[in-house]
Amino acid sequence: MFPDLRTAGGAIDSARIAEFFELSPDELKTSDQRGSALEKLEEIAANLVRLTGSVKLSRIWLTTPNAELESDSPIEVIREGDADTVADLLEDILLGQPG
């Protein structure tokens, strides 16, 4: 059920990350999502699928404005280079803790 975001060799595949988040390769580079940031995006993707049950519903969640993010959508926050904030929000939701 979880998205396969790694290559056969086990490395995180930036193209698969870009596809999951519906980011162009340029957007992925622009938002400085490299190295450990790709691991953070992989964590977000796994937690989103765990929360919503599907990639389709995950994408809806990503594009919906969120009051916890000052009415920005999670994908907007990620594009701004702040994947940590989205990861923290998801963790709070999964743990049942208020933001």
Image: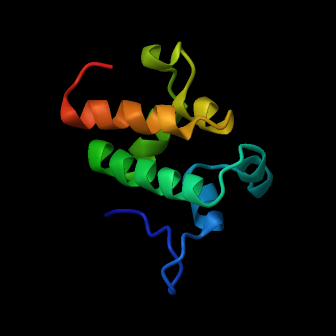
Report the label total: 0
Residue 62 lies left or right of residue 31; in this view the side is left
Please tell me which residue is depicted at 35% across the width and 62% down the height of the picture.
Answer: 2
Q: Residue at x 36, y 36 (%)?
A: 90
Residue 82: % across, % down = 59, 35
Of the 4 image quadrants, the one containing the C terminus is top left
Position of residue 41 relative to residue 6, above or below, is above
* Residue 92: percent from left, percent from top: 29, 30
Most extreme residue toward the bottom is 9
Q: Where the N terminus falls, by quadrant?
A: bottom left
Q: Nearer the viewer, residue 11 or 73?
A: 11
**Which residue lies at the image location 63% right of the left edge and 56% below the top edge?**
18
Against 74, is 17 above or below? below
Using residue 47 as the reference point, say whether residue 36 is left or right of it: right
Name the residue: 55% across, 26% down.
73
Q: Position of residue 6 (x, y in %)?
A: 50, 73
Position in image of residue 97 (x %, y %): 22, 25
Residue extending farthest left: 96
The figure's colour scheme reads rainbow
